Image (tube, rainbow, N blue to C red):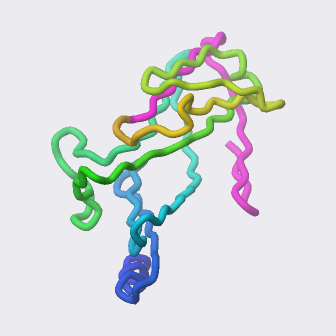
Amino acid sequence: KARDAYEKAIAGGDGAFMLEQGQPGLFTLNAGNLRPGETARICFTYALLNRWSGARLRFFLPTTIAPRYGHWTLEPHAVPRADLHAENRFSLRVAIGHDLREARITCPSHRLETRDAGDAMDLVLADETAAMDRDFVLEVRHAQPRPSFAQLGRCQEVFVAL
């Protein structure tokens, strides 16, 4: 239904966007009928459980769509077309709160700045935006060998507790 609505909007000349999950943790976004020079700002929120290995956590955020392990798992319409003139950039803010503020955090993929946000510590890209040419990688090393956490998240009127 979503794909049909998207195609109908595109055919009618309207701007339209469609976000699909191609495989767990891998999303593709179709954006159609942007006028020359027009910019679209897309924001979406998702949650996942972090997998700790002892006191270490390695978090990946893919920013490119490329064949993983030599083959595509995407639908044919979701396979990106190469365009040497297109420049896709992203920005992000990672809020580190509570017990994790004491952890040692590194980012081998991008330069980050740390900002005090009161009850949390914010990590932001040092250059404000970055090219979508490699995964964003964040490494966290906690002082405790097996940290325990509880998380409460909110998206509009929906709450999730982990």
Residue shown at 56% from the left, 56% from the top: 44
Pick out the residue farthest to the front: 37
Tell whether 74 sits left or right of 60.
left
Q: Is residue 56 above or below residue 128?
A: above
Q: Looking at the figure, which quarter contains the N terminus?
A: bottom left
The residues colored magenta run: 135-162
Provide residue 59's location: percent of width, then percent of height. 49, 31
Residue shown at 17% from the left, 47% from the top: 71
Asked whether 57 or 106 is in front, the reply is: 106
Tell whether 122 sits left or right of 140.
right
Tell whether 162 sits left or right of 22.
right
The verdict on residue 13 being magenta is no
The verdict on residue 157 being magenta is yes
Report which quarter residue 69 is drawn in: top left
Report which quarter residue 31 is drawn in: bottom left
Asked whether 24 or 136 is in front, the reply is: 136
Q: Is residue 12 above or below residue 96?
A: below
Report which quarter residue 37 is drawn in: bottom left
